[in-house]
Amino acid sequence: MATERDSDEALVARAGRGDRRAASILVERHTDKIYAVCFRTLRSRPAAEDAAQETFLRLWSHASKWRPKGAKFETWLYRVAMNICLDQLRKRKREAPEESAPERADDSLRQDDRVFAAERRRAVDEALEALPDRQRMAINLCCYQELSNIEAAEIMEVSVDALESLLARGRRALRDRLAPMREQLTGRMSDDGTAQHY
Amino acid sequence: MTEPPSTTDNLAAARRCLEIYGGDIARWPEDARARWGDIALSDALKDERAEADALDALLGAATAPSTPHDLKNRIEASYRPPTERPGRGRFWDGLSSLAGWMRPLPAGALASLSVLGFAAGAAIDADDRLTPEYEAYAYLEDSGLVAFEEETGALWDAE
């Protein structure tokens, strides 16, 4: 019988043999992280839900054959999710090539009644949305998912040097884009004490 | 032996880490933290650190995704245990695994048979040549002293 203490690898093997409980523990353990990374990459709730579901469907179909091959299960799962997101982003660009600005995050997500917090959030969301896809992915994995540079590089299938370059360029672009409002935004943040560290 | 990095090099490396990983040194990769963490915290890089901290704080203000409440249920419901195809059972699984195991057999069998044939041929040939009776018979026949009765297989005097 699968338990919460089982490793991911053991659970995948069990799920591959038809153990529904093992599948359920994997879902409980990884859905939040996979959904978060999909959401931050795709900037859309429905698209992120689709991508997360698709990620797990691929897991179910590979579970009986899955072998570690040196990579951690979680790294493999993130890589599947990232590839699905990249496919969606490419499809979006093919379908709407004239739209240079990426889709905005759902307005329903911004229900903060404090004007400045909402303004700050919108500015940051838009700055993140404007980043090239791979820079945004690198920032998602390292800054928001708190993965190590080595894990993030493995997921993105690039060298650590290339990942660091993506991170540096991404952060520089964000800093430049947010520069006009930075003083105001950071000033407000320290005034109202709502600054968060991701 | 390599020269130890100069202060300028160390400052540049610490500055680059601030650019890449932000102002929270605790979140830097371990080796970078060990080598350049103290330098990043020094007054020499005060401005760069403040800049990195400000960006970190702004990034923290981005919309935090919260998993839709029914997503896990939907994903769990999508799980399908692997099923055997109709008509397939242990026999077919066993047969297909045997077929997989036998895939390299033809080449291997051919090579083994060649080696076996060669060895057998060499052994038979060697026996014929080395048997003393054979040598004696060959000598007698060549010298016309005996003839070989093919039908009876008997040896008899040539006279």
Image (spheres, helix red, strand yellow):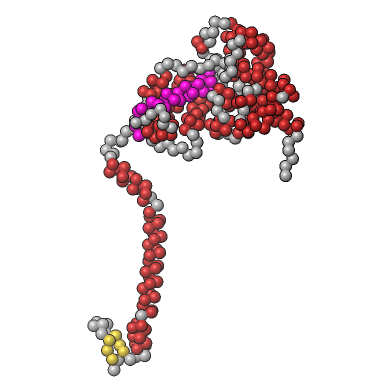
Whether residue B37 appears in this view of the structure is yes
Comparing B128 with B2, the one in front is B2
User: Magenta span has A27?
Assistant: yes
For this view, does B53 lie left or right of residue A47?
right
Q: For the point 33% across and 91% down, which residue is it? A: B145
Give left or right: position of A183 versus A84: right
> Residue B140's spot in the image, x, y percent?
34, 88
Figure check: A126 above or below A169? above
Q: Main secondary structure of the magenta part?
A: helix
x, y percent for residue A52: 46, 23
In this orientation, does residue A133 appear?
no
Where residue B8 sits: x, y (%)?
A: 76, 31
Percent of width and height locating residue B144: 34, 91
Q: Which part of the image, by quadrant, shows the N terminus of chain A?
A: top left
In the figure, residue A194 lies in which quadrant?
Answer: top right
Total labels: the figure holds 0
The residue that appears at 38% across and 55% down in the rendered structure is B106
Q: Quadrant of residue A149?
A: top right
Q: Which residue is pictured at 39% across the width and 61% down the height?
A: B112
Q: State the residue in front, B103 or A124.
A: A124
Quick check: B149 left or right of B55?
left
Q: Range of the magenta residues?
A: A17-45
Which residue is painted at 40% across and 23% down in the image? B75
User: Of residues B139 and B9, which is closer to you in this image?
Assistant: B9
| Quarter of the view holding residue A137 | top right
